[in-house]
């Protein structure tokens, strides 16, 4: 048995099938984990392409065992293995038992394909289902599932299972390094971009960033939206028509009135205040005039009744001097 996973591999071609397809099978001697590739082209170039995809996922093996198929004994295939430092072991011609591990898997694959064909199902889909079940099932020889020997963990499938206990010491170190790297990168990016806390509050009127069609387009849509909800950096906005949109807070800007709008608003307020003051002054003047009339009548009556006694006639009370407030010097009063 090899000392570790994906070191010694065995490869073989299964087919041809009635559809003209071949199944390229690659099995790991250590874990019994295997990969498949379905193709109609069985040239050396196609086999090399399939192996390169697998090597990109799992790394380069130490050795490969194959039969004496023409695609495996070509100069191109031998050059590929030599360039990657892989030893090629070829079994005895006309003796498939020498490559028995992969031949045994071929029999299981063919059984699954026959079942799918007999039940008029898609054999490719059934093959993927079979691979998931096989990789997660304990092997009869090793007593451990191929995936667990290959990756050091159990595959999650539809069968209920207990939580997998991992190496907490290794995982803790990995988590610490991961956290440190993320925090360091965040501090650097925040400083570089001048990041600051968002001042958006639910209920604010906001502007939303839009796609710019040309250089003269404004970066934000002039339509005012209402910020309905804010969870983290995700903002839920409502348009005037009642349509909801979800945007990142970096695409939302709080609406602030322009100085011209503020001046206009203040002038409207001041005008209303001046009108109310003018009305109150008119009311005061009318009341003063009414008081003067009453005093004048009472004075005349007193003069007629006390004329014989030569009583001094009292003068009417003084009227206050009315001046326009300084704050209304810039306004034309009517």
Image (tube, rainbow, N blue to C red):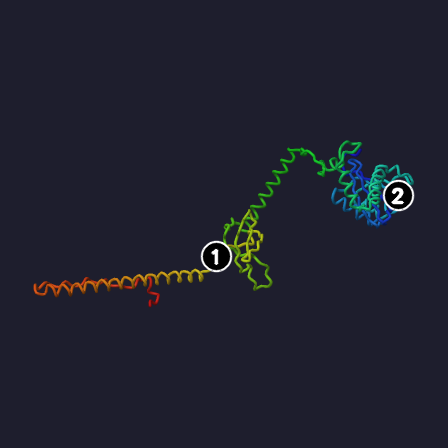
- In percent of width and height, residue 28 lies at 79, 38
Which is closer to the viewer, label 1 or label 2? 1
Residue projecting furthest to the left:
309
- In percent of width and height, residue 22 lies at 84, 47
Q: Quadrant of the N terminus?
A: top right
Residue holding disc 2: 68
Mark 1, secondary structure of its residue: loop
In the image, what residue occupies the spot 68% across and 33% down?
Answer: 162
Mark 2, secondary structure of its residue: loop
Up-down: is 277 above or below 177?
Answer: below
Upstream in sequence: badge 1 or badge 2:
2
Q: Is residue 102 left or right of residue 188?
A: right
Of 314 and 66, nearer the camera is: 314
- In percent of width and height, residue 254 lies at 50, 54
Question: Are the residues at dot 1 and dot 2 in contact (C-beta closer than 8 Å)?
Answer: no
Distance between the alpha carbons at the discs numbered 1 and 2? 78 Å
Residue holding disc 1: 256
- In percent of width and height, residue 330 lies at 35, 65
Up-down: is 109 above or below 217?
Answer: above
Of 18 and 302, nearer the camera is: 302
Of 232 and 173, nearer the camera is: 232
Residue projecting furthest to the right:
94
Q: Is residue 308 left or right of residue 258?
A: left
In which image quadrant can residue 155 be found? top right
Residue 305 - label: none
Q: Quadrant of the C terminus?
A: bottom left
């Amino acid at each position: 048995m090899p000392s570790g996973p994906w070191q010694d591999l065995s490869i073989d071609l299964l087919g041809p099938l009635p559809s003209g397809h071949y199944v390229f099978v690659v099995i790991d001697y250590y874990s019994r984990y295997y990969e498949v590739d379905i193709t109609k082209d069985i040239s050396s170039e196609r086999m090399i392409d399939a192996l390169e995809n697998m090597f990109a996922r799992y790394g380069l093996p130490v050795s490969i065992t194959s039969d004496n198929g023409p695609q495996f004994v070509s100069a191109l295939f031998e050059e590929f293995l030599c360039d990657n430092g892989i030893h090629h072991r070829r079994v005895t011609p006309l003796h498939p038992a020498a490559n028995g591990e992969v031949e045994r898997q071929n029999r299981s694959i063919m059984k699954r394909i026959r079942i799918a064909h007999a039940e008029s199902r898609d054999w490719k889909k059934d093959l993927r289902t079979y691979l998931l079940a096989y990789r997660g099932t304990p092997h009869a020889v090793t007593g451990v599932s191929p995936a667990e020997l290959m990756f050091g963990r159990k595959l999650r499938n539809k069968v209920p299972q207990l939580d997998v206990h991992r190496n907490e010491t290794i995982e803790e170190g990995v988590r610490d390094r991961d956290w440190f790297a993320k925090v360091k990168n965040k501090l650097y990016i925040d400083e570089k971009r001048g990041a600051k806390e968002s001042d958006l509050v639910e209920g604010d009127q906001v502007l939303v960033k839009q796609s710019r069609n040309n250089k003269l387009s404004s970066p934000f849509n002039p339509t005012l939206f209402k910020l309905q909800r804010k969870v983290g950096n995700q903002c839920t906005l409502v348009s005037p028509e009642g349509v909801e949109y979800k945007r990142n807070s970096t695409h939302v800007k709080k609406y602030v009135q322009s100085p011209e709008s503020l001046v206009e608003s203040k002038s409207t307020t001041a005008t209303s205040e001046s009108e109310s003051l003018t009305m109150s002054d008119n009311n005061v003047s009318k009341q003063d005039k009414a008081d003067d009339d009453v005093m004048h009548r009472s004075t005349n009556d007193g003069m007629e009744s006390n004329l014989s006694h030569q009583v001094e006639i009292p003068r009417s009370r003084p009227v206050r001097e009315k001046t326009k407030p300084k704050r209304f010097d810039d306004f034309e009063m009517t």
